[in-house]
Amino acid sequence: MNRIYIQEVAARDGLQIEDQFVPTEDKVKLINKLSETGLDKIEVTSFVSPKAVPNLRDAEEVMTQIDRHPGVTYTTLIPNVKGAERALACQADEVNLVASVSDTHNMKNVRRTTDESFTNFEQISSYLKGSKIQINGTLATTFGCPFEGEIDEHRVMTLIDRYINIGAAGVTLADTTGMATPKQVYELCRKVRRQWPDLPITLHFHNTRGMGLANVMEGIRAGIDRYDASLGGLGGCPFAPGATGNICTEDLVHMLSFMDYELNVDLDQLIAVSKDFEQQLGREVPGQVMKAGKISDLFPVD
Ligand code: COA
Ligand code: ZN
């Protein structure tokens, strides 16, 4: 396997947890610049309660004001039917449903049990029937929960099956607070691949404990070719204690392009967008390649 699909989540996972509200116009500019870098998918925003996530209260404006490139899938996170109605009105390409494998995290995140979330998802699926919107299903806390600890693999497999049954075209396994180890990623992904050889699976890692890129390599070894990542390494779930950023998009693209994987992304352009956005945010972001430069950038000898 050579082609790896890079899916950018900074505008959603990143901005939802920032201390400040990023103005709508700046969000639109950011997404437009990201669209030009050749990313495969962009998570634009989330259609959730504006009280729960005030930073993304401008979801409609952002979704309708961005320029959409034909090669890019524009997705948006939704928790319920109301989110689906809003996404459909804005003609998103895809809705990304989110439920946590851990009931406790699901209660914190969306104030209902995981089972209740899936009942909602059946309604969403019926509601969207006949529309062009694709459904992706995310399983948060797949690799560990900050409240419950270890997650039962059998439960992960059952919930993947439930997503397939409601018509999800793809499933994302998310490591919400960076608890996955590379060994665990390989073992779980092998099982998932064996059971569903052709299902589009995305891995969504947070780099909370520095294992993010190691986890990507083990995911690839297990046959997974889609990865979420966030510009500058922004990101985190506001409803999980100790949450920190996603794996950094330009660091991921840098690593994979120097390992001869086939990507559609222009690394230099991505680094430039990341530098600009760091300035705009006015705080240092976790990304490393944007600070150190690429391994091919050499320094003059005096
Ligand atoms: N979009 C906008 N508003 C929504 C909404 C949606 N998708 N879903 C519910 N609301 C509004 C309702 O209209 C209601 O508004 P009101 O108080 O003005 O009447 C209010 O939110 C409460 O609705 P209710 O159905 O009782 O929801 P809740 O209070 O139980 O909250 C969620 C449930 C899912 C809406 C809320 O917890 C949420 O949006 N969570 C977001 C989680 C998230 O984004 N996490 C990070 C990413 S994983
Ligand atoms: Zn995340």
Image (spheres, rainbow, N blue to C red):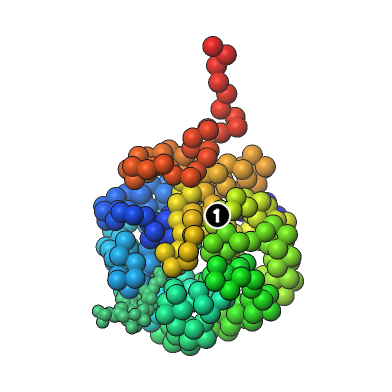
Q: Residue 123 versus residue 247: which sits nearer the camera?
A: 247
Quadrant housing residue 200: bottom right
Does the rendering let one see residue 157?
A: no
- Count neighbours of disc 1 (C-alpha within 10 A) and say few if under 14, some if 14 to 19, many if 20 or more: many
Mark 1 element type: loop
Q: Residue 154 versus residue 145: which sits nearer the camera?
A: 145
Find the residue positioned furthest to the top.
302
- The x, y position of residue 29, in whole percent, is 32, 49
Work out whether 4 lies above or below 161: above
Residue at the image position 29 percent from the left and 56 percent from the top:
21
- The x, y position of residue 278, in whole percent, is 38, 42
- The x, y position of residue 105, in whole percent, is 50, 74
Q: Residue 71 versus residue 302: which sits nearer the camera?
A: 302
Quadrant housing residue 93: bottom left
Residue at the image position 34 percent from the left and 67 percent from the top:
53
How many badges with numbers are in the image? 1
- The x, y position of residue 172, in whole percent, is 56, 68
Left or right? Give the position of 164 relative to 71.
Answer: right
Quadrant into which the N terminus falls: bottom right
Does the rendering let one see residue 238?
A: yes
The residue under label 1 is 208
Work out whether 32 lies above or below 119: above
Q: State whether label 1 is within 8 Å of ligand 2.
A: no
User: What amino acid type should be assigned to the residue bearing mark 1?
Assistant: Thr
Left or right? Give the position of 250 relative to 260.
Answer: left
Residue at the image position 49 percent from the left and 77 percent from the top:
106
Q: Residue 153 versus residue 10: which sits nearer the camera?
A: 153
